[in-house]
Each structure stands twice: as C-alpha cells, then as structure tokens.
Image (cartoon, grey):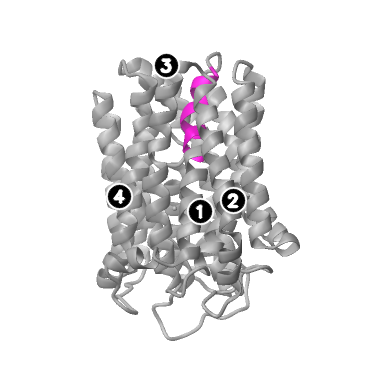
Amino acid sequence: MTATEPHTTTTDQPPTGGSILRQPRAVWAVAFACVIAFMGIGLVDPILKEIAAQLEATPSQVSLLFTSYMAIMGVAMLVTGVVSSRIGPKRTLLLGLALITVFAGLAGLSGSVGAVIGFRAGWGLGNALFVATALSTIVAASKGSVGQAIILFEAALGLGIATGPLIGGLLGEISWRGPFFGVSTLMTLGLVATAFLLPSTPPSGRRTTLADPLRALTHPALAFLAVVAICYNLGFFTLLAAGPFALPSLGIMEIGWVFFGWGLLLAFTSVVLAPWLQRRMGTVPALTTAIALFAADLLALALGAQHEAVVVVGIVVAGGFLGITNTLVTEAVMGSAPVERAVASAAYSFVRFTGGAIGPFVALSLGESHGVSAPFWFGGTAVVVGVVVLLAGSTTIRRALEGPGGHGAGQHGPADPAVRAEAELVGDAG
C-alpha cells in the first residue's frame, strides 16, 4: 500500500493553529475516498465462500481475487511516481478513483470467477494510483499543521481497513455482488467530490523513471527488507484468503465481524502501538519481535485449525502483529537507502506485493490437497524465514538507518511525522 513524499503544491506553508476538524471541503472529499479505497483490502473476505459457491469455483481459484489485485498493484507501484510527476497529483488521484469505480462495478456484473479475478486486477491498478498520491494531496490541501493532516489521513485509513469486512458482510448477505456495487457507487461519489472540490495540483519536483526503484534495490539494507516483506506478506495474504475457509460454520456476516476485529486491531497497533514500541525498543528489535509473534500466531492457527474458536482468536490477534509490522518495516525502508523516500517506497512495494501475491493461491491449493491446516503451516513457515532473513541482515539494516543516508527511522523513530505517515500508507495498503 508506493507513497509519494508529502509535497505541497503551493509555496505557502499552512497555518499551524485551528481545530483539526476545520478543513476545506477538498480535504474531506479525499479523506472520504481514502476510507472507501482502504475498504477494498478486506471487503471480499466475508464473501469468498459465497463467490466459490455461486460461481462454482474452488478455494484456490477464488484466492486469485487477492493474487491479481496485489500483483497488479505491486507492478503498478513502479509507474505511479512516473505518472504523478508528469500529470500532477490531482489527475493521478482522479485516474485511480475512476479505475476503481469502473472495475469494481464490472466485477459485480461478472458471471464467472475468471472475470471477477480480471476486474480485481484493474481495481488493483486504480488503488495503486490513488494511494500513491492520497497523503500528499491531503497534506497540501489541509489547513493547520502537517501533523493534523496526517491524523486525518490515519483516521481515514484505519476506518477503511476496519469497516471493509463489515461492509462486505452486510452487503454480501444480500448478494455476493453487493460489496462490489457498493464500492463502485461510493467511489463514484468520491470521484465527483474530488473533481469539483480539489484545486488543480500541477506536477512538481523531479520526474522519476521506471529504473529508479529497481536501482534502489541494489542497496543491501533495502534488499534485505524487501525479502523480509515478501516473507511476512506471504503470511499476511494467506491469512486473508484461508481464514474464511477455516470457518465453515460461520456465515457471511459472522466472518465480516471477525475480520472487522482484525482490521480494528491492525489500525490501532499501526498508529498507536508501533511508534511506542519503536521508541522503547528501537526499530529493528521491535520489528523482529512483531514478525516472530506473527509467525507464532500462524503456527498456532495451523495446530488449532480444526477448532473455529482458535481460528477466530488467531485471526483477530494477527491484526495486532500485522499493524506493528506494517508500520515498522516500511519506516525502516524509508531510511534504509540513500534515495528519495518515494523511490525507496516504490521499490519495496513492488517486491512486497508481487512476491507476496502468490501466497493465497499456493496456500489454498495446499489446503485443497492437504487439509485446512496446510495454508497456515505454509504461511507460518514463510514468516519464520522472514525472521531469519531479518536477523541475518539486522546489522546491515541498523547501520543504514543510523548512517548519513538514513531519514531518521532508526533506533528512536522517524525524524518527522511525514515519514511515519508514509510508512503507514504503504504498509497498510497491503
């Protein structure tokens, strides 16, 4: 989920005083669109089983709804900076919103699982373009301090992640097509509001190229973190895809409530607990602990997959570990290479999403042939490998964060709040 560096489209700095709620209508329009965009992460979880039943698809086929979405999003992260630096943030934002609107609607009209998978890929492209510019747009358009703008963004992000499964459950009880039509309708409102209320934002700064993120991966610390991200995202996406199929007696709405709890805890730990742990422990130790606990949670799910109560608790608890991991690993990325933060984010997001996207398909294919525990064994093992890679590269990563090329995301947290917001944007968009 790549973020561009927050950059203003005017030379004037916003005033620092005033209530956080006294914002221009443009800010509220983009914030509303952020909520809907981040709903897409968990929106389909409650309806996975229903889609499989209605479209006569296997669990592994349905898992491709995640794979296509994440894989295209990952590849698109290489081009979002290229697009935004040439057409400007507002046009990039509107293009992303338009693509989400169209492809979500087409997914709802689909008559086969293959069509839904294909349209989810288009949705992923739109989401990449949108989230790449959402933060910088809110910062540029808001009144008050940058910190207040970031709080608004964080609130929109958390609300979207938490409510996505709940909305998916509510609309999914009417029809599996309901969540797709709901997103398309809400995104249409967000598109119109953004088009009319957001001032023009011409391109600014250096024009990036497709090669910039790939060159960034030659820096050892960033390369280590990218591999770690692949491993823990294999576990992350496996949890999202396999969780509903490990809850056979739960209906659409019940699964929605389970993943609502997951999203709520993820949002809370990402925004509140991760920065606190970072200050107390340092980035690398806190990150290592969080990923190790996530691996233990997945392995516990594998051992207790026959008991639905264990699965429910394991899914919700995993949200807490993922919130911490998402924030800390991406903050580390921001300071791990002597390149612009936007370029480092693009490189990391490309590797993270494209590498981790295979997780749901592999996991549910194993589940079809080896039972309900197999996906969690796969996910847990992948995350354990990530812990090993992180331990092996910890010295390299720590030196990069503390060295002259770092942006401050070292042992005592980021140097400014914009870095933390960038981290949360990229981390939680997955």
In whole angstroms, how far apart are the C-alphas of marks 1 and 4? 17 Å
Q: Earlier along the polypeptide chain: callout 1 or callout 4?
A: 4
In whole angstroms, how far apart are the C-alphas of marks 2 and 4? 24 Å
- x%, y% of residue 190? 38, 52
Task: Check disc 1 and report the residue beneath it.
Answer: 427
In whole angstroms, how far apart are the C-alphas of marks 2 and 1? 8 Å
At label 1, counting other C-alpha atoms closer than 10 Å, the crowd grade (few under 14, some 14-19, many 20 or more) is many
The amino acid at mark 1 is Gly
Query: Does residue 403 appear to the left or right of 213 in the view shown?
Result: right
- x%, y% of residue 200? 32, 72
At label 3, counting other C-alpha atoms closer than 10 Å, the crowd grade (few under 14, some 14-19, many 20 or more) is few
Task: Check disc 4 and report the residue beneath it.
Answer: 125
Q: Nearer the viewer, mark 3 or mark 4?
A: 3
Res 325 label: 2
Decide which of 408, 250 is in the foreground and name it.
Answer: 408
In whole angstroms, how far apart are the C-alphas of marks 3 and 2? 31 Å
The residue sitting at 55% across, 56% down in the picture is: 329
Tell me where the magenta segment starts and ends, as one range.
Answer: 236-247
The amino acid at mark 2 is Thr
In whole angstroms, how far apart are the C-alphas of marks 3 and 1? 32 Å
Task: Check disc 3 and report the residue beneath it.
Answer: 369
